[in-house]
Image (cartoon, grey):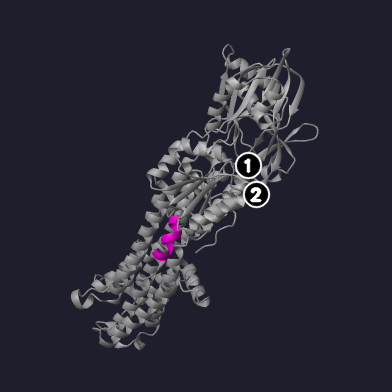
């Protein structure tokens, strides 16, 4: 109903629209309460003769006019716009009800002699000032509650935005620190970040060493050590040590800003289920107007006296009680709250359609590298020959490999450093592409590489081959190590499984989901991972376009597919799937293509996303049933179907109260999603 900013901002105070609506509601309440009391007292004959002026039409006109023409002005404007634009909505009905009740009452006050007898109660002219005022007051109450609810759903976004510091310390050319507003930070600026401060921008460390809490992005509670050359993310917290960073992305280009933008866009998106409410609303409003006209004509022709007064009352009540605000709020309120709940849990939905589609998924396709596995090679097996300690085998291999830039060599060096081993200096280093490396470490000739390199160097590794074959079956890359032409052991290097991988895959299977492993790696490695996780269906050695073909084939068989991946090569499959889910540590293109991004990179978040989708769609259906049920009951009651049976006729004020209650109920039900258990 109100416009939302394309890029959320951290407001300095209360929402101006909410403040305005609260002011209008307060004035409306102050004037409507005495107006309502006067009208009821006048009907009941409780006013003494000497002060009969209290209930006079002029008193009611004075009280009702500010309520209708000032307090209710935004509602009337929206109703007029809906007619002018030929897009009838809830404000069409509200505006018609208020205008009819108020204009008739003003006419009856100004020229009471012109009012037909059929509009009179016991000879007195019937007025509906209190009905018009009550309608405005109750609708304003609903608007205030809705605006407050909308503010609560934006709390997650504002919480994220508050993570960014308001100022930064820029280092000038002479090394002097100058504190500047965050908006003045430019790419290339060198910024100092002290212990306990948050990173003002995305960039890299130029100087210093510290431990940074990146849990807002990764979900990992342990701080990450940062030294020169390491990247940092704006909004993360520097725990220990002073750092100087060089800004690489600032303003709307930072990771934090993109997260906020993604959530905001998702909250403004429309789920396919919303189309149902839109289609119903398209014919519902004209249908209600028609019902109100038919009911009014029926009462005017065959109703009890005063016929015209009752006809007017029925028409106004029908228009007000049928206001489709509950129907209009049913889907977007649930979706908006769910988006905020997802953001708090590190689950970012690109749009509401992804949230709805996730509920229907029956097949989960998992990428291997970076999704089920850590995404970087590590030494997972150290098998020395008799008489050689594991630490010595690893130390000699790492001492040689520290001169290499190969990823496997880096894995060996990291493993030695993790154990605190002191590495020796390497002399005469030589690299054999695709085979290994050799050199002299502590006066010993060390060779690290595959079986072919060992054979070329005259090293016999036949005795180690059975163990090497066993490691290969486990999906590990085997690296032989020799010293002075004698084999001293094997290193097994692999991309290890994430700790939660087994738990997640088994959880999918328990829930009846079909699990498929899809990877571009060679079949032996993929099959080894599948066996460890209990996955029966695999597709190995698949090129990026082939991954999309596999997903397309699954969908062609009638499956609802969620694809979980992290790399550029996964982007086509992520786009092809019913729902693409990108890991938080993945590439930007994967995140841009996917409908869901898991900021933590934790596979368990996939299950959380599914549970949130199920809870959201259940909530939407509850709201829709409530809204449809309310209108299916309220419209006949307002039209007077119970009058012949029980003498019950719904007053416009009661209709407005029922309409507001239905909206409050929908909003309250949607807000329950903010506390939904998805773990």
Look at the image and give the residue range highlighted in magenta.
325-335
Q: Earlier in the sequence, mark 2 or mark 1?
A: 1
Q: Is residue 195 visible?
A: no
**What's the residue at 43%, 62% (across, down)?**
329
Tally of numbered tags: 2
Report which quarter residue 299 is drawn in.
bottom left
Placement of 409 over or under 318, stated as above or below: above
Q: Position of residue 103 (x, y in %)?
A: 41, 79
Numbered mark located on residue 166 in the image: 1
Depth check: 124 or 574 in front?
574
Using the rendered view, name the quadrant where residue 309 is placed: bottom left
How far across and how far down the image is residue 452, in percent?
68, 28
Q: Is 329 within the magenta? A: yes
Query: In the depicted view, which residue is nearer to us: 574 or 138?
Result: 574
Q: Is residue 341 left or right of residue 645?
A: right
Q: Quadrant of residue 508?
A: top left
Residue denoted by label 2: 252
Check the image and name the residue furthest to the left: 645
Q: Nearer the viewer, residue 395 or 678?
A: 395
Compared with 428, 590 (above or below) is below
Q: How many angstroms separate mark 2 from mark 1 (CA)?
A: 14 Å
At 47% from the left and 69% from the top, the residue drawn is 75
Q: In the displayed structure, does residue 622 sit left or right of residue 174?
A: left
| Mark 1 crowdedness (10 Å alpha carbons): few <14, some 14-19, many ≥20 | few
For the stretch drawn in magenta, the main secondary structure is helix
Residue 170 place in picture, x, y as percent: 72, 37
User: Is residue 652 in sight in this rendering?
Assistant: yes
Q: Give the secondary structure at mark 2.
A: helix
Determine whether the residue tagged by mark 1 lies in a helix, strand or loop: loop
Q: Are marks 2 and 1 in contact (CB under 8 Å)?
A: no
Mark 2 Cα shell of 10 Å, populated few (<14), some (14-19), many (≥20) = few
């Amino acid at each position: 109903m109100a416009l939302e900013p394309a890029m959320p901002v951290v407001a300095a105070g209360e929402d101006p629209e909410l403040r305005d609506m609260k002011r209008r509601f307060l004035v409306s309440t102050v004037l409507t309460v005495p107006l309502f009391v006067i009208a009821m007292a006048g009907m009941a004959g409780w006013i003494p003769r000497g002060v009969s002026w209290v209930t006079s039409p002029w008193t009611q006109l004075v009280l009702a006019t500010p309520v209708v023409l000032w307090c209710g002005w935004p509602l009337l404007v929206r109703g007029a716009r809906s007619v002018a634009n030929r897009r009838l909505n809830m404000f069409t009905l509200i505006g018609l009800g208020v205008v009819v009740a108020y204009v008739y009452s003003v006419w009856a006050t100004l020229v009471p002699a012109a009012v037909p007898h059929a509009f009179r109660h016991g000879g007195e002219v019937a007025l509906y000032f209190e009905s018009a005022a009550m309608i405005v007051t109750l609708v304003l109450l609903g608007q205030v509650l809705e605006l407050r609810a909308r503010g609560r759903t934006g709390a997650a976004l504002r919480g994220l935005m508050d993570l960014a510091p308001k100022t930064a310390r820029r280092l000038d050319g002479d090394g002097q620190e100058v504190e500047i507003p965050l908006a003045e930070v430019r790419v290339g600026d060198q910024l100092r970040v002290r212990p306990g401060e948050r990173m003002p921008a995305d960039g890299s460390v130029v100087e210093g060493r510290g431990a940074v809490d990146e849990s807002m992005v990764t979900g990992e509670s342990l701080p990450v050590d940062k030294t020169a050359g390491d990247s940092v993310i704006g909004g993360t917290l520097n725990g220990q040590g002073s750092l100087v960073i060089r800004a690489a992305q600032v303003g709307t280009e930072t990771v934090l800003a993109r997260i906020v933008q993604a959530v905001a866009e998702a909250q403004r998106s429309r789920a396919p289920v919303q189309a149902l409410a839109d289609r119903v609303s398209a014919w519902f409003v004209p249908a209600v107007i028609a019902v109100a006209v038919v009911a009014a004509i029926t009462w005017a022709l065959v109703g009890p006296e005063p016929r015209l007064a009752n006809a007017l009352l029925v028409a106004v009540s029908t228009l007000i009680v049928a206001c489709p605000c509950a129907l209009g709020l049913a889907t977007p309120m649930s979706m908006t709250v769910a988006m905020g709940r997802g953001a708090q849990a590190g689950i970012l939905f690109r749009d509401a359609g992804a949230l709805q589609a996730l509920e229907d998924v029956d097949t989960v396709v998992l990428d291997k590298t970076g999704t089920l596995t850590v995404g970087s090679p590590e030494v997972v097996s150290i098998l020395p020959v008799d008489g050689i300690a594991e630490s010595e085998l690893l130390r000699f291999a790492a001492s040689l490999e520290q001169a290499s830039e190969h990823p496997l060599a880096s894995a060996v060096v990291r493993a030695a450093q993790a154990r605190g081993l002191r590495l020796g200096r390497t002399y005469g280093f030589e690299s054999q592409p695709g085979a290994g490396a050799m050199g002299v470490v502590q006066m010993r000739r060390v060779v690290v590489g595959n079986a072919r390199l060992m054979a070329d160097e005259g090293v016999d590794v036949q005795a180690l081959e059975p163990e090497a074959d066993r490691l290969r079956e486990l999906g590990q890359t085997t690296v032989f190590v020799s010293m002075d032409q004698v084999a001293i052991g094997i290193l097994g290097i692999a991309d290890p499984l994430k700790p939660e991988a087994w738990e997640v895959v088994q959880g999918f299977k328990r829930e009846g989901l079909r699990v498929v492993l899809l990877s571009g790696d060679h079949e032996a490695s993929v099959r080894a991972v599948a066996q460890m996780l209990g996955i029966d269906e695999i597709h190995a050695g698949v090129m990026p376009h082939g991954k999309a073909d596999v997903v397309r084939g699954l969908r062609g068989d009638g499956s609802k597919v969620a694809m979980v991946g992290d790399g550029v090569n996964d982007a086509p499959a992520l786009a092809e799937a019913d729902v693409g889910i990108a890991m938080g540590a993945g590439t930007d293109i994967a995140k841009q293509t996917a409908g869901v991004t898991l900021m933590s990179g934790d596979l368990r978040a996939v299950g959380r996303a599914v549970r949130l989708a199920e809870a959201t769609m259940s909530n939407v259906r509850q709201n829709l049933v409530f809204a449809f049920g309310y209108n299916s009951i309220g419209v006949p009651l307002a039209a007077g179907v119970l009058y012949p049976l029980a003498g019950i006729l719904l007053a416009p004020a009661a209709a407005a109260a029922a309409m507001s209650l239905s909206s409050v109920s929908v909003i309250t039900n949607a807000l329950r999603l903010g506390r939904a258990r998805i773990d």
